Image (cartoon, helix red, strand yellow):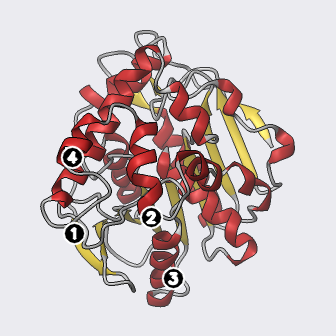
Amino acid sequence: MTTFRSFQSAWWLPGGHLQTIWPSVLRAPGALALRRERYELPDGDFIDLDWVGEGDGPIVVVLHGLGGSSDSHYVRGVLRACVAQGWRGVLMYFRGASEEPNRLPRSYHSGDTGDLNTLIGELRRREPATKLAVIGYSLGGNVLLKWLGELGDRAPIDAAVAVSVPFDLAATVTRLDLGFARVYQQRLLRCLKWSTARKLTRMRLPVDAAGLAAIRTLREFDQRLTAPLHGFRDADDYYSRATCRPYLQHIVRPTLIVHAVDDPFMTPQVIPAVAELSSALRLELSSRGGHVGFVSGPPWRPQYWLEARIIDYLTAMLSC
């Protein structure tokens, strides 16, 4: 089902770019007491987890976007909101995305659902009766939706939310190499280069330091590193096989997708049609909101509508 939400964009943040940039740069981080857990993976690598909240309430797993962390405005905001509900929240750092480089040459990518599947299995083993939900942002939203579609009715969670998802990876990478969107591309590329450069001091990769420095676009990075490190023929093969769009019809668990038509990371053409959605999916579109933005209210008291909408949805799903 697709609906248009009555999200009212802040008058002082009228376009997709301002909605995207303002909370990322100027939102106050706020206090958040995190507990770090290192989870060892079956292949000898690890992922780091940042936990918040106490007690035995529902667990909400958060999947960050490319270059995201517990310092990202959207991560901190939703984790604080979870604590306010009496829930436990946990940010799952994708492999190689936390402060310490992961042990293997491979890292993470938009279609890598294996580590999420392993973590959810572990949480179910620890607390089989606990309500469990997952929230994915941007790249993390693509991973989440692909995983849900892969498993269908075997997905061992109660509900999910995906935000600002790049439904067509090839089209998104193309869009990010045009006009002002190149600013976002360069920021994302810096994150990828930084994490890769750390690993170059410890192991051999498909490019050396000079080759890494010469990479200018996300597509080139995916061609030279993401594809060969993760078993794809080339960047186009990666985009085709990793995108979540073909999996949407197979999702069974109740899932909310929040998306803005003016998201500057992609064009409106990537938004899936109703026929591509399963009956378990609720796609809520707003004409404005940017990429993981959705800021309303006056400049002296901005309101983060996105978090409120996520909590409202999960409250209804987790109380069933």
Comparing 180 with 213, the one in front is 213
Secondary structure under badge 2?
A: strand
Amino acid at circle 3: Gly
Residue position for label 4: 194
Q: Residues within 10 Å of mark 4 (few under 14, many from 20)?
A: few
Instruction: Mark 2 or mark 3: name the one nearer the start of the chain.
Output: 2
Q: Which residue is mark 2?
A: 61
Residue 239: x, y in percent? 58, 47
Which of the marked residues, 4 or 1, is nearer the chain's N terminus?
Answer: 1
Which is nearer the eye, 151 or 303? 151
Report the Cα–Cα distance between label 3 and label 4.
Answer: 31 Å
Q: Residue at x 19, y 42 (%)?
A: 210
Q: Residue beneath label 1, please? A: 35
Looking at the rendered structure, the kind of residue marked 4 is: Trp
Badge 3 marks a residue whose secondary structure is helix
Residue 103, quarter of the rendered image: bottom left
- The residue that disc 3 covers is 121
Quadrant where the image shows the N terminus: top right
In the figure, 183 relative to 209: above or below? above
Q: Say if 300 sits above or below 137 in the image.
A: above
Q: Quadrant of residue 90?
A: bottom left
